[in-house]
Image (cartoon, rainbow, N blue to C red):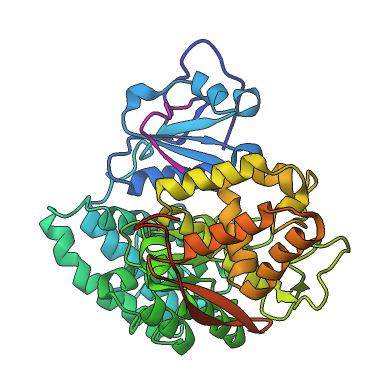
Amino acid sequence: APTAAPTAAPTAAPTADECFYPSRGCSTAGNRRLPLANAELCRVACEVTEGCEFFSYIPDESVGFLCLLCAAPENQDYEQCLDEGAPNGQCVGGPETCPGEPPEPLPAELLTSATTAAAEFCARGPDDFDWSTPNANNEPPLPFAGSDEEDLLGWALALFAITREWQDGVHDDDVAFQAALGPAADTSAAAILDNCGEAPCGYGAALVSNVRSFLLLYDANASRAFADDAKRRALFDEHSIFLADDGYFDEASVDAISNIYATLPTRLMEQGVLGAGTQFCTATCQEAFRCDDDTSQGRILVVTKTSFNVHRRRLGEMPENVFRKTTTGPTWPGTPMADNMMSVFRHETAHQFDRTMNPRQQELRTSIAGRCIVDENWLRAGLLVKEGSNAYFKAHHQEIVAGNIGNQYIYSTSTQLEVARYRVDAVGDLLAMEWFVFNVDVVGDETSATFFERLGPGYTAAIPVGLDRAYAGGP
């Protein structure tokens, strides 16, 4: 898409052959933000999003390739490009539909077309997919942009947008949309049964993943969404975790991931991992959807209120020491080596625990952090960051629970306790022990807590322990 330096005068409206205004933006107030790979996808996002009339796109990695969806055309203002940090004000904007294009499809039509496109893609196979050839009805679904890749991305984005709106209740009063849900779910289920290929450079991976998430929301179980995958089906049905990884993780990895959620206390699952009023939590591996330098697909996968992203690394590929630098030497004697894939999953899962914390626990976290001076005051003393653990955690309080509970406590509670005791015995430092008691406080409920012990690099066992508090809801 063309870009130009901003001018004081408004840019002329686009012609029938031009969908974009150079150097025009829109207000960020109350408007939707999406990280998308190009301006054309941003325009499609506007077209398929309820209430969007105008879009702007900043083509710069430093701001995350930002797409803004605007509710009203009067918000067009090139100066907004500068406000968003676009280099030299470079951005493009335009209306939801190009001049001369058909009007925006109704929500029911969009849902039906997107799921039909997925079924067509899966029925024909990624190696024999061509929108230019007729489908079973002797017509191709309406293409978004012209090439097969752009069409598939467009339909993936359409299904992403319409599913989010459905979950948010936007179409609750739309009789036609409600009537279209059942047939669309049946079409989606048929697509999954076609054993659809999901190679990321075939550009159908995000579309198939979004078909699965739509089915998971509609069915409230994984019987059809993962009819082709028993491991991921069990992960969802038993723990409400949707693994959106384009099939990247092998069976051993998925089994180990399931072990995390099987051992977590019910309160942390219900109030934390699923604590934002969502039916399930989405665990994405965006790198598995990457095609060379194109990250478009990995950016349009999450339709739930709780989610997290993990790295592209399987069980057993990279051991790591999560208790690094917790003594005067480089390694705690006898420290069990953790698995990096599992450490990342535990870390990101523990980020969800923050929403379970009450005001007393939040104040306690701030109090202990404020008294820490050196890295060794922290249980996670050996964090591999340039500024060191102390400076990092003081500047990023949102990483404290994830780093200290996620990486250590729910991997080997006894080792973490030994580290805290060592600091007391060796130098009289009580701060590490305060952090350990804080961890027990966050993980536990009124009368009990859970300790975790390593069974192997990827597995832990949960051990219930009694807990006495000074008073109800207290320490």
The answer to whether residue 5 of the structure is visible from this angle is yes
Q: Which residues are magenta?
A: 25-33
Residue drawn at (28%, 58%), measured in percent from left and top? 167
Position in image of residue 159 (x %, y %): 36, 60
Compared to residue 358, the image places residue 458 above or below, namely below
**Does the segment drawn in magenta span residue 222?**
no
Query: In this orientation, which residue lies closer to the viewer: 171 or 280?
Result: 280
Residue drawn at (34%, 49%), measured in percent from left and top? 48
Position in image of residue 121 (x %, y %): 43, 73
**Residue at the extreme top:** 8
Compared to residue 158, the image places residue 250 above or below, namely below
The answer to whether residue 148 of the structure is visible from this angle is no
Compared to residue 367, the image places residue 321 above or below, namely below
Position in image of residue 227 (x %, y %): 38, 86
Magenta stretch, main secondary structure class? loop
Query: In this orientation, which residue lies closer to the viewer: 179 or 138?
Result: 179
Quarter of the image for the N terminus: give it. top right
Query: In this orientation, which residue lies closer to the viewer: 312 or 447?
Result: 447
